[in-house]
Amino acid sequence: MTALLEVDAVDTFYGPIHILQGLTLRIEPGELVCLLGGNASGKSTTLKTVLGLVSPRNGSVSFAGEDVTRRPTSYRIRKGMAIVPENRRLFAPMTVLENLQMGAYLHGGGTKEDFDRVYDLFPLLHERRAQLAGTLSGGEQQMVAMGRALMSKPKLLLMDEPSMGLAPILVERSFEIIKQVHESGVAMLVVEQNANVSLSIADRGYVLSTGRLVLEGPAESLRENEDLRKAYLGR
């Protein structure tokens, strides 16, 4: 089977600083993969490389069977990538409905079926569709950010630190929603520091440390890995 996303032996630099060092990972269609690591491990740079916001010096990025290494971000979005950015980055002065419409700009603002699909996943968004996004709670804003990304009908949904800034009870709810979105058929790459909750819903995981992969495998086996438990799971 052709991988949906394949990052092969990528080296990414910021000026003279070597950030990603021979990074290789893949995501199959419909799979939920988490990318774990602490601060300055290279997680965000991985997302930027996948999206084309930074270009690797060596290696390649392939998406949906095509080498997109030198393709711009706009091309990758049209081809089926979408992102829920760190801290959600909603259009705060705009309504929930207007934020969702922005997510569907490639499809003329979205069809009734597009909105129905998002509202089925997040009924609260239908209730709050006329409310300004900036007045919502953190958990509600996360729903808007995910709904906005889903309006573009992505093949691959990238999530950057979805637990960032959320209270513990909202983190659990947020990952329940991520699992629900995944079960609707969307492949996902979830970049997180919270290893325990990420691995509880993922199919597979990768662990980064200073730009290198140090662990990878099925989520269940990673949860039982002694080194990972000491470093990230607090056990």
Image (cartoon, grey):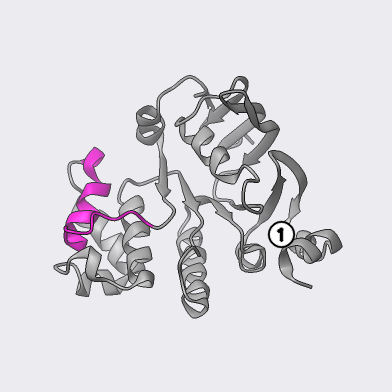
- Residue ranking furthest to the front: 16
Q: Residue at x 62, y 46 (%)?
A: 40
Residue 106 included in the magenta stretch of the image = yes
Q: In the depicted view, which residue is nearer to us: 91 or 151?
A: 91
Report the number of numbered marks: 1
Q: In the depicted view, which residue is nearer to us: 185 or 189?
A: 189
Q: In the depicted view, which residue is nearer to us: 179 or 173?
A: 173
141 displayed left or right of 37: left
In the picture, the quarter occupied by the C terminus is bottom right
Q: What amino acid does circle 1 point to?
A: Ala
Residue 201 included in the magenta stretch of the image = no
Q: Residue at x 49, y 24 (%)?
A: 68
Q: Position of residue 3 (x, y in %)?
A: 61, 36
- Residue ranking furthest to the left: 130
83 displayed left or right of 99: right
Which residues make up the magenta segment? 88-107
Q: Up-down: is 80 above or below 177?
A: above
Q: Position of residue 214 (x, y in %)?
A: 78, 45
For mark 1, give the secondary structure.
Answer: helix
Q: In the depicted view, which residue is nearer to us: 44 or 148?
A: 44
- Residue ranking furthest to the right: 226
Q: Residue at x 48, y 55 (%)?
A: 185
In the picture, the quarter occupied by the N terminus is top right
Q: Position of residue 55 (x, y in %)?
A: 52, 24
Quickly name the residue at label 1: 219
